[in-house]
Image (spheres, rainbow, N blue to C red):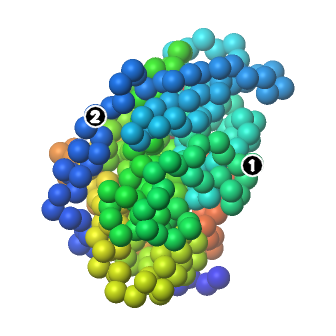
Amino acid sequence: MPAFDLPPTELARHRPVPDEPDDFDAFWRDTLAEPPPGGPLLSAHPVETGLRLTRTWDVTFRGFAGDPVRAWFSRPAGLDGPLPAVVEYAGYGRGRGLPHERLTWVAAGYAHLLMDNRGQGDQYGCGGGTPDPHAGAPGGPGPAVRGLLDPHDHHYRRLITDAVRAVGAVRALPGVDAGRVAAVGNSQGGGLALAVAGLVPDLAAVLVSAPLLCGIRRALDLTDAGPYGEIAAYLSVHRGAESAAYRTLSYLEGVSFARRACAPAHFGVGLRDTVCPPSGAYAAFNRYGERSGAEPRKEIHAYPFNGHEHGDAVHVRRQLAWLAEVTGAA
């Protein structure tokens, strides 16, 4: 697919006016105001994976409304810690899968929490195990359109809350250095990591690639692929619902979360990405930290001939070197 978004020189200075409601901060403050009673963790049970160099626990923590959310927690065998930790968020339609699927961060010496996506897990990978008991509001079948007509009902309000609670959960697990926790994600996971960076003020770092939920309104004008296509399909049937949908999506906009973030940030983007158009990632990057009162360290790596896979393993190599430096794990 040829490049279809803004040229690189324009992407580098792309700073659109934020699509941000006046009560954005109040909305998220109220959503996160009352952590579930009893602490973040419900359970953590060791599991046998057949991996001799990795220890893994099946974790359940309290997410939105205290709902149980599943996760895999893994750490290198033989390292007692306390270790810096990576909280990883999975892509759209995926669940946490199987514990041996994602070992990069563990192999690099980090404690690693991989959060399940509530109400997802049936489109890719090896499934998930976290239902979404609040998914009854009007909207289409896909997560991107569940509860689309009211921000209080939308799937991503719950999923972003889960993502925030996952940071508290990993900090409560043994052998974790609570002061060195990074949020990491690709695609939907990148959008979640960016939201966490805007809502959790003491993250050590955030690593975002090909992020969903950034520059949402522009993305809806550019692509019918993936989750944005689900939103467009819904609005093609529910004519006249655009205003309500855009209002809901404005509370989920990654650029708004990026503006409030202060952790060091590492971005990756493919300039031929038709799933999450690169202008969204650049809008978030260019406005990153502007409302935080700080000037956080940040860098972005663009891959001109790649799409949604961005730099793939080449980019992961860059992430590993950067995070080791930022967290002092080198």
Tell me the quarter of the image containing the N terminus.
bottom right
Task: State left or right for residue 267 relative to residue 77.
Answer: left
- Residue at 32% of width from left, 61% of height from top? 151
Number of marks present in the image shown: 2
Q: Residue at x 79, y 27 (%)?
A: 49
Spatial distance from mark 2 to mark 1, Cα to Cα? 33 Å
Q: Does the rendering let one see residue 301? A: no
Quadrant of residue 124 within the rendered picture: bottom right
Against 30, residue 256 (above or below) is below
Q: Residue at x 56, y 66 (%)?
A: 142
Where's residue 288, x and y in %?
31, 55
Assign the C terminus to one quadrant of the image: top right
Q: Amino acid at mark 2?
A: Glu
Q: Nearer the viewer, mark 2 or mark 1?
A: 2
- The residue labelled by disc 2 is 34
Q: Residue furthest right?
A: 50
The residue that mark 1 highlights is 126
Q: Which comes sooner in the sequence, label 2 or label 1?
A: 2
Query: Residue 158: percent from the left, percent from the top?
Result: 42, 49
Q: Badges 2 and 1: C-beta atoms under 8 Å apart?
A: no
Amino acid, disc 1: Cys
Q: State which quadrant residue 249 falls in.
A: bottom left
Mark 1 Cα shell of 10 Å, populated few (<14), some (14-19), many (≥20) = few
Q: Secondary structure at mark 1?
A: loop
